[in-house]
Image: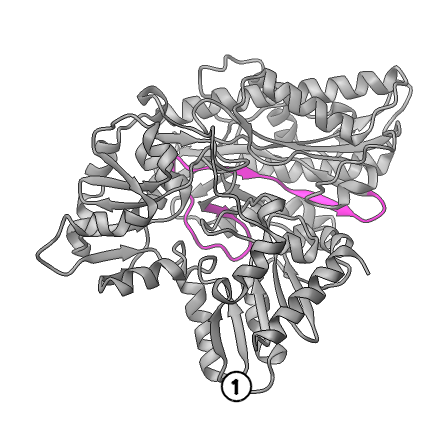
Amino acid sequence: MSVHANRLADLRTHMQGNGIDAVLVRSTDEYLNEYVPAEKSRRVFITGFSGSMGDALITQDTAMLFVDGRYALQARQEAPHFDVRVMTLSQSIESGWLSVLDQALALKDRSLAVEFDRIPVSLFEDIQEVATSKSLSLVNSSDVFSPFWQQICPTDNHLDGNKIWPLDISLAGESTHEKFTRTQLFFEESGLDAFVIVPLDEIAWLANLRGNDFPFQSTFASRAVALPNHLIIGTTKEHIANTQSIQGISFVENVQLIEGAQKHFPNKRFRVGLDPNQTPELVRRQLSAMDAEIVSIQSPFRSMKAIKNENELLHMRESFAKADNVVHQTQHWLCKQIEAQTPVTEADVDNFVRAQFKKSGTIELSFRPICASGKNGAVIHYGTPDSKTPIKPGTLFLLDTGGLYAGGYATDLTRTFFVGPKTHKPTPEQKRLFTLTLKGSIAGMSARFPKGSVGMQLDAIVRDPIWRAGYNYEHGTGHGVGINVHEFPPRIGPGNTTPIEVGHVFSIEPGIYLPGFGGIRIENLCTVVEDPDNNNFLRVLPLTFAPFDSRLIESTLLTRHEKEFLVYFKRCFLLSQTHLPPLPPVLG
């Protein structure tokens, strides 16, 4: 038996000894982070699957792993002892295991252990609804399995040497006080005394602070309570000791956070808001235990954070330009190595791109690089670069990278390029599939759409050239980018009904993935601006300009507009990094 099969067996023994019929193991941590270090991830420990998203549902008879389309191949490779269920573009991972709870626990009077600290309130209510209809008892798995988790997956909360630092107002563009001024109407209309903030990027954004407690983020371990004109941050003793006084912000130890906020209202019942989609059930229960009046309401800070001001956009553009150069340098280096017949592996490219990001001034990567050669490109989030097999001339290489610079905003860029000396030419099929993907990318980056348009409409614009050729891709077209590489809003994907607004920064990343052939993805970051020619419309403005591999472009497949766009795109790569680029040519 493999190590993960043994761990699964040990978990089932522990379940049986505690009268637990099923366990739900989430991919997140207690901060609902997307990226959790493998050594601290319960799900990775049990399943072996190392992707950023995916939940496991385990009973004595079944072991199911639910993932989205990005991880279909990877999950099956890494978790062979699990029944991998791949969700379609219209399904969420959570909807997958919710739909089979009644089948997995067919008999009544069964018990289901869930992680109260890793389940948002809204999702916990969905679980409760199923539990009530099936007479399931819900148990906090942290209570039942604490000794087990500590034994097999210890959590080290010691953050010695980690730091918090203030963000200069020239980068933030707005002080914490000014941000609070914009939320006065929210507090007045909701009648709230306070609002609990859990997402780490919201806390970092509101406080104009950055930290290095977590991989692939510029955030720090914390919870926060926003009062109408004051922010209370609960964090570690080490951070409190090393953080200077900041006007409008006070720091307390995490365990004192709620009590500290309640002291501001000693003569009445504490009325506190929380976002049910972003707050763990455990936090809600802690508030209930204090007899607080809880109001479920969407965070006002989430939408504020998503709309970038001029200072933020300028800093992000400067960061994106540095990342453009890193990708361009890496592409040039790899092709030179291959031309010189120097053996190079995917791991060598991974090491090179990491070193280039460090030289360019990053404080951290914004995600683990994807360095996929040939058929490995078909694994959408390929994360295990080969250190033994030399990259073959004549193959396609998919490079997906990102970094975090001084302002703590993420970059994210993907280029697919041809690897080979000048004597090698791409095959007609390589050129055709690349150009089809490029056509989708251009459609998104030059899009014009009416105000009020939503994510799924821009998604369809990007997919149209690829659909017409009979292909599709099993991931969204784009995601918001900010302090975290994935933020919401916006989201560009099927079924998404959130409006795209001026100041949103997001990716446009169509792809074509064929097992045995490999994968092609082209990803650029963009924002949205007012259409200067029509007050009722908005325009997409590209912000990343790393060159496309011209060897892979089949010009006969391009329209006149697409060719004009490529001329514009090449010119923008040469522009000064201190100015936002001009608008691209619009189809007309």
**Residue nearest the viewer, comparing 423 with 372:** 372
Image location (x, y in percent) of residue 372? 76, 36
Q: Residue at x 66, y 58 (%)?
A: 46
Q: Residues within 10 Å of mark 1 (few under 14, many from 20)?
A: few
Q: Residue at x 14, y 48 (%)?
A: 264
Task: State which quarter of the image contains the N terminus.
Answer: bottom right
Secondary structure found at label 1: loop
Is residue 57 in the magenta section?
no
Is residue 503 in the magenta section?
yes
Image location (x, y in percent) of residue 521? 69, 38
Q: Is residue 169 above or below residue 201?
A: above
**Residue nearest the viewer, comparing 311 with 158:** 158
Q: Amino acid at mark 1?
A: Asp
Res 509 quadrant in image: top right
Image location (x, y in percent) of residue 548? 69, 26
Horizontal placement of 152 versus 165: left or right?
Answer: right
Q: Residue at x 82, y 26 (%)?
A: 419
Q: Is residue 92 visible?
A: no
Horizontal placement of 318 versus 338: left or right?
Answer: left
Chain part drawn in magenta: 490-517
The residue that disc 1 covers is 109
State the predominant SS element of the stretch in magenta.
Answer: loop
Q: Is residue 301 above or below residue 238?
A: below
Image location (x, y in percent) of residue 305? 36, 39
Res 281 quadrant in image: bottom left
Horizontal placement of 414 versus 344: left or right?
Answer: left
Most extreme residue toward the bottom is 108
How many discs mark residues in the rendered view? Answer: 1
Most extreme residue toward the left is 267
**Residue nearest the viewer, comparing 338 with 141:** 141
